[in-house]
Image (cartoon, rainbow, N blue to C red):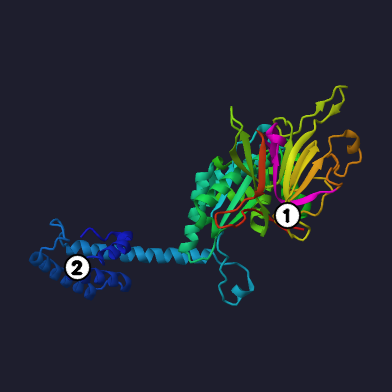
Amino acid sequence: MKVYRQAEVTDNVNAAKEVRVSGLRRVYNNIERSVGEGVTNKTLARVEKDMSEASMMKSRRRSTLLRPSLHVDLEDDRRALIEAEEEIRKQQREEEERGKEGRRVGTPAEEEGVDVPLPPLPSPLVIKELQISDNALLLGQSSHDVLSATFMQAARVGDKRFVRLSGSEEFEKAASTAYLHAVSSGEERGTFQLCIGGGDGTILAFLSDLLLAHHRKPDAMRNLQLEIYLLPLGDANYLARFLALYDGWYGATVFSSISNPLPQLPHINAWDEEQSEDDDLVEPLAEGLSSPLHLLRRQVRNYIRDARHTSRIVVFECEIYCYRVGLSEVFLNCTIPFCQRAQIVNQADEHGRKLPIADDKGKGMSAALNVVLEYTEMNAVGVLRQKPVKEIRQCSSLHFSNIPREREKTVCPQPSLEALEMVAMSPDPAKRKKTRLPGVENLVFDGRSYHVTDACVSAPDGQGTFEVVLDGEKFGPACMIKIKPTRTEDGRVIHFPVQTFFPIDL
């Protein structure tokens, strides 16, 4: 019979159990027992006897379940059983060798004769690498090579823990694979590690993939623990700066290592992988070298291994409404997720900065922004006000901040709180001389900021438009926007879980 061939024994035995012919069922059960107990002459004799009975039964009953071409070849079956036993023994030897390699060396327990196994390897580590412009790197090519070299080495040795992601579909597939792996292993929740190399624009693009995964794969994302490691490789790295400000170890080991311009000096790479044909010699040779690339790779490895605190940053969404051409009605154009800051201005440049507009006398002055503002306020302890507030305001720009920028004198940040700090800027330059926020204009709302859970900003009387800047990316023009926390279908708030060494939720 050609059913049993090496690794196919288990699957074919399970398939054979479904056969309704009693004689063949006994044959397959005996084969299964013989594989587990070991092949002996007595076992083979019992199998041969059962096969002969099954052959006679086949000729008498002419069961429709058996094809005419099916025949019993005792020699093939005997050879298949021997091959199956050898395969099982080979797998057992490989498992014993892997167990010996995974033991610690030099531990007190091992000196007493007790084997202490290493902790299990983490779930598949996924690195998201996007296109990065040349002027975005302060390290020349070193910071980019730390990812490229990792991929090259992983591909060379066949390490499948490192995978490139280039879109939402690949992220969903990788997340689903991690979830199914956890379910098959009997774990309650799976762990999915993601290392993002880029700036605020890369994070903004990833948030869209994260929302799509929550809507398309709700079961997998609900039972999956996502761990994100952030490497500041972009033009604007305000989120990484915030992490470095409130997590000193992240700032000293990760942010400063990548943002420090000293590695721009001429240097050589850690090693050239193509010069050595022996895989075992690559890593020992590299350990004796000292270069910015080698040191940077070590810092990234330490960050992924030691950053075990998860800072859960709330993800907000901004619904952008526009006028329908030729009609007065308003329609929802798009919904953009963000996690740091939303700015409403009259006009912004391609980098998301507000453009100044000169007055009649030629003096620089920002144009006044007239908006209808409706929001729900929250106090410092997280208690909502009873009724939403609706009012018309005139300001230079309107800011909703979840992550404060550097040198801003705001209240202690709470990124995990479902609230944004709302600040309005005065259009009068005279009132902006005594600035509360260094580098930013003064407040309008009674000289203080507000904490809001949701807000709706629209042009008065349905006339006029404005532009929206979300995490440094410009959108619009829009006639109305709605900002609120992003939730799943079952009402859970979606978070951006970034890994830090110490908690940043103050």
> Residue 235's mark?
none
Neighbour tally class for label 1: few under 14, some 14-19, many 20 plus, Cα within 10 Å: few
In the depicted view, which residue is nearer to us: 224 or 16? 224
As for residue 469 lying within the magenta part, the answer is: yes
Q: Position of residue 205 (x, y in %)?
A: 61, 41
Main secondary structure type of the part rendered in magenta: strand
Q: How many marks?
A: 2
Quarter assignment of residue 504: bottom right
267 left or right of 177 in image: right
Residue type pointed to by label 1: Lys
Neighbour tally class for label 2: few under 14, some 14-19, many 20 plus, Cα within 10 Å: many
Residue position for label 2:
24
Q: Position of residue 162 (x, y in %)?
A: 54, 49
Quarter assignment of residue 11: bottom left
Find the distance from the CA under tag 2 to the CA under tag 1: 76 Å
* Mark positioned earlier in the residue sequence (2 or 1): 2
User: Relative to residue 23, is residue 450 depicted above or below?
Assistant: above
Residue position for label 1:
387
User: Relative to residue 236, is residue 284 depicted above or below?
Assistant: below
In the image as oriented, which residue stretches furthest toward the top?
A: 361
486 left or right of 441 in image: left
In the depicted view, which residue is nearer to us: 329 or 260? 329
Numbered disc 1: secondary structure:
loop
In the depicted view, which residue is nearer to us: 506 or 245? 506
Residue at 81% x, 49% y is 449
